[in-house]
Image: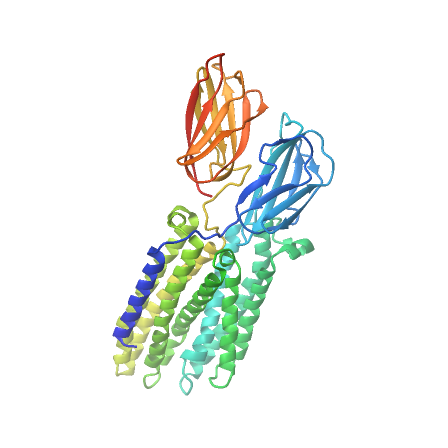
Amino acid sequence: MGGTRTRSILLVTAALTALFVLGPVAPASAHATLVDSDPAEGAVLPTQPDAITFTFTESVTAVPGGVRVYDATGETVASSATTDGSVLSVRLEEEVGEGTLIVAWRVVSGDGHPISGALVFSVGEPSAQIIALPPDSTGPSWLLSLNQWLGYLSLLTTAGLVVFLALILPAGRGTERARARLVRAARYGALATAATWILNLPLTAWYQFGGGPGILADADIRAALATPVYAVSAAVVLGTALAVWLIRDGRRGGPRPFLALAAALVALAAPAFTGHTRAATPELLVIGADILHLFAGGVWLGGLVALVLVLPDLAGRPGTLAADVLTRFSTAAAGVLVVLVVAGTVLAWRIAGSWDVLFGTAYGWLLLSKIAVALVVVGIAAANRFILLPQITEATRRKDQRGAASVLARYIAAEVAALVVVLLITGFLVERSPQRDASPVGSGATVVETVYLGDVEARATLKPALEGPVKVEVELFDSAGEPTEGMDTPKLWLSSGDIDLGEVELTSVAPGAYSATVVLSAAGTWQAELALQVGESETPVAVAEFEIGSR
């Protein structure tokens, strides 16, 4: 490919990248969040509810044993739980007396991330004391991420070797030893792919459901693990094995190389049907972009590994065999680069969804780190294409060809190493939510502001300090720091800019303590205006401000 054409492709790539990255972006839904519960957090009900419901932003999957109901002493209350789309319903299977109940819940969102929380409400009247629940735990996400990295590394490398054997390495004399080496490497790659993607099943179950690495021994857990998780692992393992078997003798010609390519494509495409792409919208666009991204990544990584393995041998052959192979791969790599950049940009656009996620979350910083390393890879590739490749194609003596090929092989090895780092970051991206870490209702970050209503100290608490359902608590203390009361229940008004929720009805939960549950419809600065009647004609008013974050 000529330099002018290559530069044109790079310019088109840059323009498309600018279009997707700098253009307006819409929020992408990629992780379920609790938005409502019935009863509300802190509610006091006159009688036992028929059902306790939790509503999420997206469909969720129930976890076997993931919902537990306790009374105030920590005793388990018999219950059952079901999910219907975005609603989790819990039914109490026994009668409960007056007092406080705690519903600890755990579900799995559409992108495979487990989410959990606890709801506290009372029947009749609240209990004087409530036992603290142990924190919910998941399996080690780093272990799953590490296995995902090894799985993607082996899958992309193996599929790329198959593509190289079928399309890049020419048939004929002089390539027999190179073909045998690549076939042997592809077999090892297929074994590594099978091991990692089969191991992915118990590690995913451990991460989502907790309980230990042997969790798949439980039939209920096996049934609860999402069907796409099984299907993806099966497609990857069987597709890779079939591709390597079809290409096993390394010969070109006939239908087998094309069947091997089709099997490799199935294996590469399968991971696009699980994870963040299942939760982002529009689903068809995101899954299609992910398939192209995976296929292009396999062609690039596998092709580079193939060049490292066979380039020195090809450079020692008579003629221009090494230069021809390099030219073929370089031509394919130019198109692969365009696909990688455009598909990767579309994925970032739809999964991250906003600049706030890109620069304000761990997912965003990992994504930026991946892009930075990818730019290093592109720089090395450009040096290989425009500096080192001409040295081989222009060399007339076999000794000069071998010397240039040796230098190029070292640069290609560096390119492979950088791509391995990109895949390592990708392994951790796959298992991290592209949203701010948000605490569900009933747990998480708490903000407290103190104001004074005459001689009364009022502490206003919001939990969590996030948009959506929030528990508001107001506590009153006298000058000695003891709980105190006014002549009437405190009055509370909440507003933010043009949003005015009006008066919030507070319920007494203890001497000098009041609570309510509200839904804050937007992030930003919220004003809480408090008023307390402390005398016949004295009602001091004070305003507290809270910074509310995005979920």
Position of 175 with respect to 199 (left or right) is left
Looking at the image, is 138 positioned above or below residue 121? Answer: below
Q: Nearer the viewer, residue 519 or 244?
A: 519
Outermost right residue: 94
Q: In this view, does 38 lie above or below 60?
A: above
For the point 26% across and 76% down, the residue is 391
Q: Which colour scheme is used?
A: rainbow
- What residue sits 45% from the left and 45% below the top? 436
Horizontal and vertical percent for residue 122? 64, 31
Query: Can residue 81 be seen from the camera position used here?
Result: yes
On the image, the x and y values in percent for residue 100 come to 65, 31
List the single residue furthest toward the bottom. Answer: 173
Indicate the position of residue 401 as horizontal and vertical percent values.
29, 79
Q: Which of 341 and 123 is in front in this view?
A: 123
Q: Nearer the viewer, residue 182 or 515?
A: 515
- Residue 247 visible, this orientation: no
Residue at the limit of the structure toward the top, as seen here: 536
Residue 430 position, x and y percent, is: 48, 56
**Measured along the vertical axis of the image, is residue 530 above or below residue 102?**
above
Screen quadrant of the N terminus: bottom left
How many numbered badges does the structure rendering display? 0
